[in-house]
Amino acid sequence: MPEISRFFGIIIRMFVEVGAVHHMPHFHAYYQGQAAVSGISPVELIAGELPRAQRRLVEAWAELRQRELLDDWNRLQAGQSAVPIAPLQ
């Protein structure tokens, strides 16, 4: 699963199987052995769990980078590589 960003110990990845049907654009966030899946539009937790502070950081980052996340989702759907997205600083 390609890593598209990393910040404050949080790793953001996105994976799409070309030709497979996915219900909605989403990404995966990992932090110290915990994982969450978040929708891109709207930005919302779909599955999993992160500590509250890290979840809020992921949500803020995703709101700021929503267009880039959707662009990466579309690239992956088309069989192309994702482009790294700037982290929170």
Image (cartoon, rainbow, N blue to C red):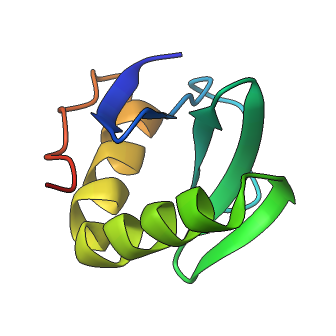
Residue 25 visible, this angle: no
Work out whether residue 1 can be spotted: yes
Q: Is residue 79 left or right of residue 85?
A: right
Which residue is drawn at the image coordinates 43% and 33% (left, top)?
A: 9
Q: Is residue 79 left or right of residue 56?
A: left
Report how many numbered discs are placed on residues in the image: 0
Image coordinates of residue 75 in percent, x first then y, are: 31, 38
Q: Nearer the viewer, residue 41 or 46?
A: 46
Q: Position of residue 37 (x, y in %)?
A: 71, 50
Q: Position of residue 70 (x, y in %)?
A: 35, 60
Q: Residue at x 27, y 21 (%)?
A: 81
| 64 vs 14: above or below | below
Q: Quadrant of the C terminus?
A: bottom left
Residue 64 drawn above or below residue 32: below
Seen in the picture, residue 8 relative to 50 is either above or below; the reply is above
Q: Say which of 74 and 5 sits in front.
A: 5
Observer-nearest of 14 and 63: 63
Question: Which quadrant holds residue 61?
Answer: bottom left
> Residue 25's spot in the image, x, y percent?
57, 58
Residue name at image x 35 percent, y 41 percent: 8
Judged left or right of residue 10, residue 7 is left
Q: Residue furthest bottom?
A: 42
